[in-house]
Image: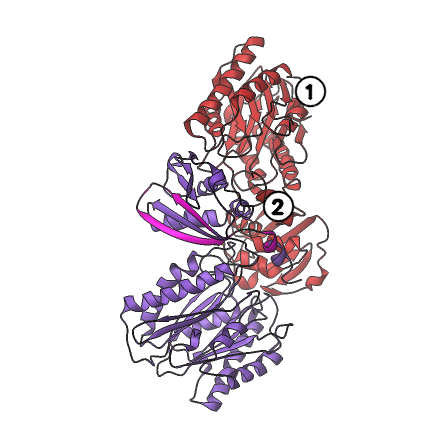
Chain colours: A purple, B red
Amino acid sequence: MSVTAPRGFRASGVPAGLKASGAPDVALVVNDGPAAAVAGVFTANRVKAAPVLWSQQVVRGGQVRAVVLNSGGANACTGAPGFQDTHATAEHLAAALTAVGPELGAGEVAVCSTGLIGERLPMDRLLPGVDAAVAALALDGGAAAARAIMTTDTRPKTTEVNAEGWTVGGIAKGAGMLAPALATMLCVLTTDAVAEPDALDEALRAACRVSFDRLDSDGCLSTNDTVLLLASGASGIAPGRAELTAAVTTACRDLARQLLSDAEGATKEIAIEVVGAADEDDAVEVGRAVARNNLVKTALFGNDPNWGRILAAVGTTRAAFDPDALDVAINGVWVCRAGGAAEDRAKVDLTGRDVDIRIDLHAGPATATIWTNDLSHAYVHENSAYSS
Amino acid sequence: MSVTAPRGFRASGVPAGLKASGAPDVALVVNDGPAAAVAGVFTANRVKAAPVLWSQQVVRGGQVRAVVLNSGGANACTGAPGFQDTHATAEHLAAALTAVGPELGAGEVAVCSTGLIGERLPMDRLLPGVDAAVAALALDGGAAAARAIMTTDTRPKTTEVNAEGWTVGGIAKGAGMLAPALATMLCVLTTDAVAEPDALDEALRAACRVSFDRLDSDGCLSTNDTVLLLASGASGIAPGRAELTAAVTTACRDLARQLLSDAEGATKEIAIEVVGAADEDDAVEVGRAVARNNLVKTALFGNDPNWGRILAAVGTTRAAFDPDALDVAINGVWVCRAGGAAEDRAKVDLTGRDVDIRIDLHAGPATATIWTNDLSHAYVHENSAYSS
């Protein structure tokens, strides 16, 4: 399962003492080849954590043989010393792997971190943790790696997609701060397909665009988001680009759905399907405006089919539509037609966890679905108590 | 006090049975002249309530002799029948005022509504309420009018600004859904200054830009926001444009501050002062991004000086800045310098209601302050229970 499902990969997850709880907090994913192709997608936030700045450079080189991930500290807003810590971690892992296998440079090591922003990592605990993680590397270590990258996640997220003789596997973490252009999330995908970096890049960007980028739990954009795709080529099979993209997309969608269902304090999983849009950008803009509207989100928490708040949210966008032509259905009941009240809102059953909102703009053929959560007491509680 | 402080105005507020509580819900402001100049600023939401569509037309005419306002129903997303209800209300008031005074047309009556979206107003109760409000008109009726427009407001909002022989008065309502380009708010300002509609328009737009438009309680933009400024000319004094703008701005700032302090469920009043911006637009964009960030807002609710979340919010903007040059102070303590940790966050005292966040972009001379609230359990509670 997970990142060790495809051939050519080992992984591990160990406790290094970064988390006060003593839970696992350092993970490794190692690509044993024969190939070491890589692609990456990183946060759009202009305030980027040190490991993001590092890994962007490494991925640009097109070769990654190992990824080290830590929870218990984001290493964001830590300046030049923080970047040196990331560099030292990559150097340390490269040396430790070289000592027990083929030679490896720090420039082939990606680094991911997650946790509180603004504090240095305790390197005296992290580096011994990296050594322990190297010693623990195993062909079935994917599950341990998935556990070691959890922060407020209540469960590990893993995926496996089997194609014709090759496989895509993945792990992810993230349970809040989900926003477009990636959630506060780390994700490592692996495949034993034979693929060049540019094919991986194309597949990964296409997959993220319709999975993680369509997730908007609370509109907040993290400093550390990273999605990596490593290809070992160990299957000997070189899929076509469409086939590769399809499998990576399936894996990303599966992980995105798991992130949504584990979002901090949420009681609802809400799909906002925008149809009849002039183009896909309009559909996404409308979906996001509704997904980010705190009045819509609190109404759904209160099981209130308040379609007026949905229309008010749609009205803040620049998408093409006529306000007098908007239709809205909530869980299949068309409570709003032509911009006004239609079916009785009392017919809407919001007692379940899944909520389906459908908005018809009547302006064209395009469609998009944005996923979000409600805004609950528990969300406020978890996020007001996270760092203090 | 309030709208009846300037000479030439009468007002009233009465219960008409629109609110289930039996509290006052219909208000009138009447301009007895000699002049009837008007200016208005309306919601930027493209889904506009019927009274907004109506009053926009009326204000375009440049003459308004009366404003009728109701709480207990927004008359938004009610289609053509809702617009007819607004028209009928204006006709009814014009006839009722004509019966007891100089002739008045519906085209000189502005209408404002606030309450739940998507339901028709009970005209059988509203129109008799208008008659009762006409009968109750008084030279000291401003306070009653301020009470009759309240929804979830816990207290009426009024203001009075005295200039050299002339006065500006005002009432406002709004206690949530505060967002740029107006909060869910209604505001009527009056003055006995002599001023043409274009001078009033210039003063009102300038005043709103630095008061109501800088308030961003929860990022949600209402369908009904309206700010009207009526001038009776009864003082006989024609102030200069700068003088008029200054007085109207003072009145708007006073009311905006009252809206902020009464925002639904808030425990904090937060001033986000952005300095060192390349231009004012950048300063406003950064301030809004921080004001709308649920992770910042929940952290402040939890008395947590989590400056990393502030930096992450700044990083989502397109404003000019270098991430490694950002400084952030919370209540006077510079917890972040040059994009990294500086003074000990434990020094920050967040136990009070007022919070001052100062962000220095080090990119230029411009500055702007955005006002917002925290995101609390009570906000979630009030907004999840509003209509059900």
Image position, residue A312 (x, y; %): 48, 40
Q: Is residue B298 above or below residue B73?
A: below
Can residue A147 be spotted in the picture? yes
- Name the residue type under label 2: His
Tell me the SS state at disc 1: loop
Residue under pointer 2: B381
How many other residues sit within 10 Å of disc 2, few (<14), some (14-19) or many (≥20)?
A: some
Q: Quadrant of the C terminus of chain A?
A: bottom right
The chain letter under disc 1 is B
Where residue B324 sits: x, y (%)?
Answer: 55, 64
Q: How many marks?
A: 2
Q: Nearer the viewer, residue B52 or B383?
A: B383
Q: Residue at x 50, y 30 (%)?
A: B75
At 62% from the left edge and 72% from the top edge, which residue is drawn? A19
Q: Is residue B324 left or right of residue B165?
A: left
User: What percent of the width, then of the height, locates residue B210?
Assistant: 57, 40
The relative height of residue B330 versus residue A5 in the rendered view (above or below) is: above
* Vertical position of residue B282 compared to residue A196: above or below: above
Q: Quadrant of the N terminus of chain A?
A: bottom left
Report the residue that reaches farthest toward the left.
A240
**Disc 2 and disc 1: Cα gap in Å?**
37 Å
Going from N to C along the chain, the mark reached first, 2 or 1, is: 1
Q: Mark 1 highlights which residue? A: B140
Q: Which mark is residue B351?
A: none
| Region rendered in magenta | A355-379
- Residue A249 location in percent, x, y? 36, 64
Q: Quick check: is A374 in the magenta stretch?
A: yes
Q: Quadrant of residue A129?
A: bottom right
Would you identify the image quadrant in which residue B6 lies?
A: top right
